[in-house]
């Protein structure tokens, strides 16, 4: 479990780290905790390795925590972001970056531990969900969080993931019914992981680093699913 703390006040980073370590050791979870003192150093550090959970201050010199979170979401959709700040005015902006929780300073240690436990459960759920692909060589298990989208071509379906593509025989409609709630149909040939969509246009969407076509028949459905994801 890789946990990051970003706060420009060293004593607050140390205090938060001590609380997190106590809870993680109590649960017997192997972990690493990385500390960053600015939005700039955080973004540089996360380029090298994605964090599972991020405790992030908002008001910092240079790049603010909110701006850092926005940039983070351009590359990583799965990091659990928890804002820890003295300013309550940013709560609604937190929805824009899919913030998991919002803790106000000064905080109670038990509150930090409670939110950490919830975040650990969230990372566990996202890790254990998968889709099984049947190929001639055998069965392959793909983590849902790694799948960007499915595309169909005649009798074959291709699962495009963060690590490559896997092809198998099947129907896109069958995949859609199995993954209802996680994936959204955008075209007769495309089914996208809603969590991987970063932007919508009237005729397309950005999924990962690719622009995919959105047909008129599915435009409203995608817009609703995207809005719902933004608010969760």
Image: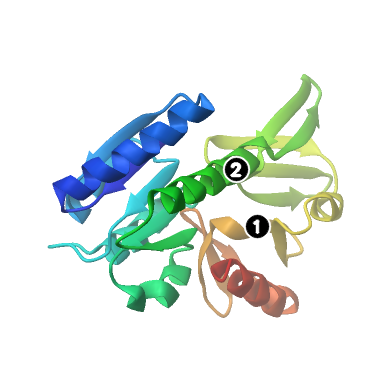
Residue 37 is left or right of residue 89, and the answer is left
- Of the numbered discs in the image, which one, if any, rests on residue 192? 1
Element carrying mark 2: helix
Image coordinates of residue 20 in percent, x first then y, are: 38, 39
Closer to the camera in the image, 16 or 41? 16
Residue occupying the point 77% across, 19% down: 137
The quadrant of the rendering that contains the N terminus is top left
Q: Does residue 78 appear anywhere in the picture?
A: no
Q: Does residue 154 appear anywhere in the picture?
A: yes
Closer to the camera in the image, 47 or 149? 47
Residue occupying the point 66% across, 76% down: 224
- Of the numbered discs in the image, which one, if any, rests on residue 140? none
Q: Residue furthest left?
A: 61
Sooner in the amino-acid sequence: mark 1 or mark 2: 2
Image coordinates of residue 114 in percent, x first then y, are: 51, 49
Label 2: which residue?
Answer: 121
Disc 1 and disc 2: Cα gap in Å? 25 Å
Residue occupying the point 72% across, 74% down: 218
Q: How many marks?
A: 2
Image coordinates of residue 30 in percent, x first then y, are: 46, 24
Image coordinates of residue 150 in percent, x first then y, are: 69, 50
Residue neighbourhood size for the residue with mark 2, other residues' Cα within 10 Å, grouped as few (<14), some (14–19), many (≥20): few
Residue occupying the point 31% across, 65% down: 66
The part of the image, by quadrant, that contains residue 196 is bottom right
Residue neighbourhood size for the residue with mark 1, other residues' Cα within 10 Å, grouped as few (<14), some (14–19), many (≥20): many
Closer to the camera in the image, 59 or 98? 59
The part of the image, by quadrant, that contains residue 165 is top right
């Amino acid at each position: 479990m890789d946990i990051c703390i970003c706060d420009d006040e060293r004593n607050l980073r140390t205090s938060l780290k001590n609380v997190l370590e106590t809870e993680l050791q109590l649960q017997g979870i192997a972990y690493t905790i990385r500390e960053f003192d600015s939005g700039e150093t955080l973004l540089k550090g996360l380029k090298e390795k994605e964090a599972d959970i991020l405790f992030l201050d908002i008001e910092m010199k240079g790049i603010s925590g909110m701006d850092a979170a926005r940039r983070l979401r351009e590359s990583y959709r799965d990091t659990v972001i928890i804002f820890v700040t003295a300013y309550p005015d940013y709560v609604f902006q937190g929805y824009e970056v899919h913030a998991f929780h919002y803790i106000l300073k000064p905080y109670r240690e038990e509150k930090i531990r409670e939110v950490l436990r919830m975040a650990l459960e969230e990372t566990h759920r996202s890790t254990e969900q998968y889709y099984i692909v049947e190929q001639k060589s055998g069965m392959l298990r793909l983590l849902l969080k790694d799948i960007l989208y499915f595309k169909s071509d005649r009798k074959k379906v291709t699962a495009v993931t963060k690590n490559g593509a896997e092809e198998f025989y099947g129907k896109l409609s069958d995949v859609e019914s199995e993954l209802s709630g996680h994936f959204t149909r955008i075209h007769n040939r495309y089914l996208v992981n809603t969590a991987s969509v970063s932007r919508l246009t009237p005729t397309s969407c950005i999924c990962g680093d690719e622009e995919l076509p959105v047909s008129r028949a599915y435009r409203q459905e995608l817009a609703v699913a995207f809005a719902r994801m933004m608010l969760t």
